[in-house]
Image (spheres, rainbow, N blue to C red):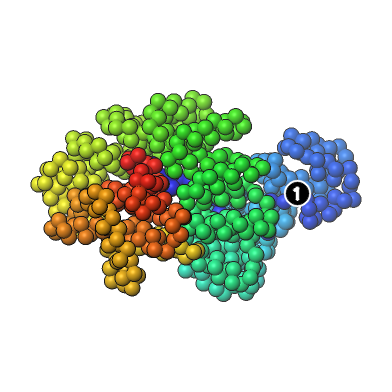
Amino acid sequence: MCSILAVTSIPIQIQNPHKSKPIWLSTPSYTNLLNQPNLLFLFENCKSIRQLKQIHAHLFTSGLSHNPYALSALFEFSAVSDFRSLNYALKLFDTLNPPTLFSFNTIIRAFSTSRIPDRSVHFFLEMIKQGISPNKYTYPFVLKSLSVESSLLFGNSVHGHAIKMGSSLDSYVHSSLIHFYSMRGALTDARNLFDKSPETNVVCWSAMISGYIQLNQFTDALSLFNEFQIEGLEPNESILVSVLCASAHLGAFEQGRWMHIYVEKFKIPLSVNLGTALINMYCKCGVVEEALKVFDKMRRKNVLSWTALISGLAMNGMGQRALEVFDEMLKTGLRPDSVTFVGVLTACSHGGLVDDALKYFGDMKSKYQIVPKVEHYGCLVDVFSRAGLLNKALDFIQSMPIEPDLAIWGSLLNACSVYKNAEIGEFVGKLLIELDPLSDANYVLLSNIYAHKRRWADAIEIRSLMKERGVKKCPGCSIIEVEGVVYEFFMGEKSDQRFRELKPMLDEMGRRLRSAGYIPTTSQVLLDIDEEEKQEVLCYHSEKLAIAFGLIHTDPAMPIRIVKNLRACVDCHSATKLISKVFNREIIVRDRLRFHHFKSGVCSCTDFW
C-alpha cells in the first residue's frame, strides 16, 4: 500500500560558509569593482545570463576583457548566482589563466549544488594537481558533493588532507565532516568528531542533529537537542527544521508544539522550509487544524509546502479537502510534481473517488508531462482495492508497463483480507511468500484469509511454513508522548514495574469492553494455544498498553495520541473504537499506513485500512 508517511519529507540542510547570499558582497571581485562604478552597476543589476553576455561583450569593447577582477565577477555570477549557467561558467573558467584558489573554490561550490556534484571532486583533484592548496572554503563543498554519492574511503582521504592542511578544526569544515560521515552511514565516526569538536557551536550541533535525522534515529536527535538546550544555545533554522522532522516521525506533538511556540515567541520568520516543517509535523501528529493555520500564515509557499498539506490531509482521512487544496494550488500557477500526485491519488483512495483518481492519473502525463512511477501505480491499485474492485485491481497490476513491487501486491493482499476474498487472496499471498519469504505480514494475512473461510488446514499449513522458515512476527511497538517525554511499549510487556502500574487499568478496560459487547478477534493470534490464552495475548498488544498509559496519565479532555510501527490489527482497531466510546476519549493512532481518529465508537478510516 502506498504510504504517505514515507513519501512526505522535508529537506534537512546544514549551514555552510557560502550559503546563498547577494553576489559580489565581501568578495575580491566586488571590492575591486568599486573602482569601476559603471561596471559595478551593470553587475549588480544583472538578472539573466543573456544580460551577463551583454556585459561580457561590453568588457571587450571597453578594453576590460583581461581585467582579472571583472572576469572573476563575470565568472562568479555565471557559476553561483540565482541565474547561473554552468556551461557558461566552464567556458569562463577555461579563460582564467592561470586559475586561482578563488576560481577553483567557486567552480567547486557551483557543482556541489548541481545535478552532477562529482564534478566538484574533479576540480578539487585538479587544483591539487596544479599545486594550489585548498583552504577552509574548499573542503565544505567537496564534502557536500561526496555526501551525495561516494565511497567512505575517499571521504576519509579528504578528511586526512584537511588535517594535513590545518583546516579540519575550522567550524564549517568540522561540521561538514560530521555531515559527510552521517550521510554515508558512519554515525559513530560523526559522533566521535562531534564529541571532539574544538568548539561545539550551533553549526556542529546542527550537523549532528541532522545526521541522526538522515539515519532515522529520531529519538537520538531529540535527546541531543535536549543537550543543546541545556548548553543555553539558540537554535538556527536548520536545527528547528530537524527537530520538527524528528517530532513528526515520532508523533511527539508536545515537542513539536513547543518548537512552534518558540518560533512565535522569538518572532522567527516563517520561511518556506520552516513553515513546511511545521505543517508536516502537525499533520503527522494528527492536528490538521493547526497545520492549516500555519499554511495560511505563510507569506510564500512552494510546491513542497502545498504537497505537505495535501498529503497530510490525505493521511488523516480528509480526502475531499485535500483535493480542494490541490485545486487551490493549481490556481496559483504552481505546477505539481510527482510527489504531489502521490498525495492526490491517496486522497482519492481514502475518499473512495475511483473516477477522480483515474482522471488525475491521466492528467499526470497528458497535462504535466510526469511519467507515472511505481508509487503512482501503487496508489491506483489502492484506490481500486479500497473500493472493493479487487478483480479490477488485479487486472490493472497485470497490465502495468512496469514491474509491480512488493508494496503493490501487499496492498491487494490487504484488501483481500478486508473483503475476505480467498480466491484472489490465495493467489497473491502465495506469490508474495515466494517473492518475499521473510516478510511475516504475508503469512499472517494469508492465514487470516483462510481462517475467515474456515479453511483451518490451510491456515495451519501457512503457520507451519512460517515457523519452519524461522519467520517471526515483527514485535509491535507503540509510542505515546506525555508531558514532553516519549514512552515506548512493546507487545507482551509484563515483567517490569511499568506493567504493574498498567495492570489495574488494563483490567478496567477489559471489563468495560466486555460490557459493551466486545468479542476478541482471536483468529488474529497465530499461536498454538487455547482460546483463553489467545484472548490474553490480545490484551497485551502494544497499542492497548499505550492507551492504558494514556488513560492514566493524560487529561481526560485531551486526545490520546499514539504512533505504532505496524498496521493496526483488526482486534485492536475494534477495541479502540469501543474504548473511545466507553471512556469518552478521543484517541488518535498513527499506524504504518495512515491515521485513525477514534471518537464516540467510530473511526475516521471507516474500517478500511
Q: Residue at x 31, y 49 (%)?
A: 578
Q: Residue at x 28, y 71 (%)?
A: 495
The count of marks equals 1
Q: Quadrant of the N terminus?
A: top left
Judge by depth and name the residue closer to the eye, 377 or 173: 377
Which of the pair 512/111 is nearer the observer? 512
* Depicted 360 relative to depicted 222: above or below: above
Q: Residue furthest left?
A: 457
Query: Residue 398: x percent and y percent?
Result: 29, 31
- Provide residue 69's location: percent of width, then percent of height: 81, 51
Residue 447 pos. (x, y %): 19, 47
Residue reaching furthest to the front: 515
Q: Residue at x 59, y 66 (%)?
A: 205
| Residue for point 86% across, 37% down | 61
Q: Is residue 425 visible?
A: yes
Which quadrant of the structure image shows residue 502? bottom left
Q: Is residue 271 above or below residue 161?
A: above
Query: Dot 1: few (<14), some (14–19), or many (≥20) neighbours within 10 Å?
Result: some
Q: Nearer the viewer, residue 391 or 27?
A: 391
Q: Is residue 263 left or right of residue 580?
A: right
Q: Is residue 67 above or below residue 412?
A: below
Q: Where residue 231 appears, x then y in whole percent?
A: 61, 72
Instruction: Give the structural element (helix, strand or loop) at label 1.
Output: loop
Quarter containing the C terminus: top left
Whether residue 146 is visible, yes or no, is no
Report which quarter residue 562 is drawn in.
Answer: bottom left
372 relative position to 491: left or right: right
Amino acid type indicated by mark 1: Ile
- In the depicted view, which residue is nearer to us: 60 or 231? 231
Q: Which residue is mark 1?
A: 23
